Amino acid sequence: MKYNKTIKLKNGAECRLRNGDEKDGTALLEIFNLTHEQTDFLLSYPDENSFNAEQEAEFLKEKTESPDEIEIIAELDGKIVASAGIGALGKKYKVKHRAEFGISVDKSYWGLGIGRALTEACIECAKAAGYTQLELDVVAENKNAISLYESVGFVEYGRNPRGFCSRFTGWQELVLMRLELE
C-alpha cells in the first residue's frame, strides 16, 4: 500500500506521513526502540526487539508492496518521529475482514497531532484495503490514547484485566476496541 501526505501540526510545523521504505530500516528500528523505552503502554520492551536494521528494512518493503497492509512513518525535519500501521488479522475467510492497528510516537512529539494524523491515515488505508473492521488493544491507564481512539469512532468491546504484565507495575488491563469501517 502507498501513502504520502503532508500535514500541519498544532505548533505550525509541517510533518510528512509516508510509507516507510527500505532505506528507513535503521531509523525505524531506532524510533521503535526509543518509543518502547519511553512508555510502558506498548507491547514490548526494547530488549525484546528481535529485528535488526536489515530485517526492519525488509518489513518496510513488504508492507509497501502489500495490497492490504501498511506501515506509515511520520517525518519531521527529515527525522522519523513516529510510526503506525495496519496488519491483517488473518487470510482465512472468517477473519479476512479484520485488521489490527498499532502506533507509537516519540514522547517528545506527543500532543502535536501526529498520533491523530497517523490514526486517521491508517483508517483511510484500512478502508481502501477493503477491511470492514479495525481493531486495537490499549492499556486502560492510557487515557489520552483512549480519548483519541474514541474521537475517531473506536468503541470498547471488552477488557482483559491481565492483558499485559508490566516489569514495573504488574498487571495492566487492556481495553479492546474496534472501529466498523462500513
Image (cartoon, rainbow, N blue to C red):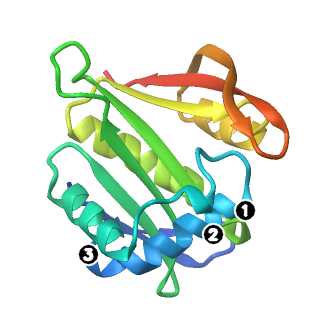
Three-letter amino acid code at the position of disc 1: Gln
Specify whether residue 111 is in view: no
CB of mark 1 within 8 Å of CB of mark 2? Answer: yes
Could you say which disc has been placed on residue 22 in the image? 3
Q: Which residue is mark 2?
A: 34
Disc 3/disc 1 C-alpha distance (Å): 25 Å
Locate residue 41, reporting x and y percent: 69, 45
- Mark 1 Cα shell of 10 Å, populated few (<14), some (14-19), many (≥20): some
Q: Quadrant of residue 147?
A: top right
Could you say which disc has been placed on residue 38 in the image? 1
Disc 2/disc 3 C-alpha distance (Å): 19 Å
Three-letter amino acid code at the position of disc 2: Leu
In this rendering, the answer to whether 88 lies above or below 42 is above
In this rendering, the answer to whether 31 lies above or below 131 is below
* Residue drawn at (26%, 18%) of the image: 95
Horizontally, residue 20 falls left or right of residue 6, namely left
In this rendering, the answer to whether 16 lies above or below 37 is below
Locate residue 175, reporting x and y percent: 65, 24
Q: Is 80 or 90 nearer to us in this picture?
A: 90
- Mark 3 Cα shell of 10 Å, populated few (<14), some (14-19), many (≥20): some
* Residue drawn at (31%, 67%) of the image: 55
Three-letter amino acid code at the position of disc 3: Glu
